[in-house]
Image (cartoon, rainbow, N blue to C red):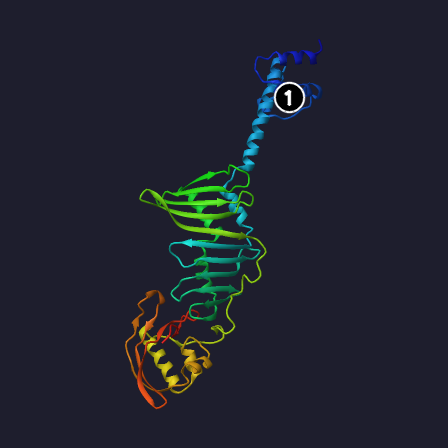
Amino acid sequence: MNPTDDLERRIRSLRVPTGDTLDQRILADALARLENRQSTTTPLDLLGSSVWRTMMRSNWTKLAAAVLLVAIAGTLMSLRQTASTAYALEQTLEANRGLRYVHLRFDGEGGELREAWAEFDEKGQLARLRMDFPKTEDGAKEVLWENGKAEVWLKTKGHAVVLHAKEEIAELVKELAPFDPKVVMEQLHQAEAKGKVEIETQEPSKEGDPITLVADYKDAPGKREIYRVNPVTKLVEQRKSYLLVDGEYKLMGLLEYLSYNEAVPEGTFVLDIPPDALRVDWTTQEVGLAKGDLTNEQIAVKVAREFFEALIAKDYNRAGKMFGGLPGARLEQAFGKMDFVRIVSIGEPTPHPDHRTRFLRVPCEVEIRMGEETRIQKFTPSIRANECQPDRWAIDGGI
């Protein structure tokens, strides 16, 4: 009997019920090794070449080694496949590094931001930003930032303002931060590393379904966030925020990432401002008066006085400067049909009932004349530090 026939007989007489398929695979592997006798490195090489030769002198040992090699190969293959498919949070962090454009929408309690579009440059720095605020102290407004300038469309008031935003952009980015996918996932990763949050990863049961992350915060009992991650791009598509109330999780907010890195739709970074809307450019003029060493109350009174004195002198450009930089023609259109005769009184400023506006309201009485009628008219201009020029104060909330 030749060695090959003997080896085949021994394999088939094994009492381990391996099955025909595995028998053939083990046999083929062992025969190939007998024929080729090539030197290959295996985990068993760690035993040393002399030990290996001693063990392999027995045909039974050779057979057992063949079985072991097949088992090891299968195990390594399984581990390799698992490593390539299992999701890790670091995959999303890496995917976010290539972020160039994102469109997001937020629905939930608290906060004013509802929708935003952001474009980033090659270095990951913010290049253009548009934000939608349906409800603020100034009413509904939209903000567009680009090249160091921000344009604010005050939809409720019906006018737009252009301003330098080197410092203001920091505030805009701060507004965006809780929704920025790069910031959101980096904070989640850091919280997990510090043991502040426990994350359960639920792999999709069907191909194409999203990966689900359930994050429970140890330092904020009852706080839970559920993330939906795209299984292909590894980018987060949705975050739901919950709070445990009376034994049940209540949905507090829904953050959706509607698109990533797609071609920016035409008109995305253009505000839809009506052609006849009032537009004020704070980047080309100084508005109001410099506060200097005056108190807030003193500068508010001074602005009110300057405004009415300008109207008395029919200097509408000067009056417009006190009124947040409005064009003189707009002031003449509003007040040109009446004569401002004299200032009767200017009272002590008081804070606006809505403290968020930061206005000081200045009660004023002014004698005006329309035709042959003369009367004392009460005004209450709302005055505050200018958003673009914080060292200057102006009327910014009507009179």
Q: Determine whether, in the image, residue 341 is placed left or right of residue 58.
A: left
At 41% from the left and 48% from the top, the residue drawn is 241
At 47% from the left and 57% from the top, the residue drawn is 115
The N terminus sits in image quarter: top right
Looking at the image, residue 93 lies above or below residue 295? above
The three-letter code of the residue at mark 1 reads Arg
Q: Horizontal and vertical percent for residue 344?
A: 29, 84
Q: Horizontal and vertical percent for residue 226?
A: 43, 44
Looking at the image, residue 247 lies above or below residue 352? above
Q: Residue furthest front?
A: 372
Q: Horizontal and vertical percent for residue 29?
A: 65, 21
Q: Horizontal and vertical percent for residue 111?
A: 39, 57
Q: Can residue 58 be seen in this snapshot? A: no
**Residue 310 lies in quadrant:** bottom left
Q: Determine whether, in the image, residue 357 is placed left or right of residue 33.
A: left
Dot 1 falls on a residue whose secondary structure is: helix
Label total for image:
1
At 48% from the left and 45% from the top, the residue drawn is 228
Looking at the image, residue 12 lies above or below residue 311? above
Q: Residue furthest bottom?
A: 372
**Residue 399 lies in quadrant:** bottom left
Q: Can residue 71 be seen in this snapshot? A: yes
Disc 1: CA contacts within 10 A as few (<14), some (14-19) or many (>=20): few
Residue under circle 1?
Answer: 25
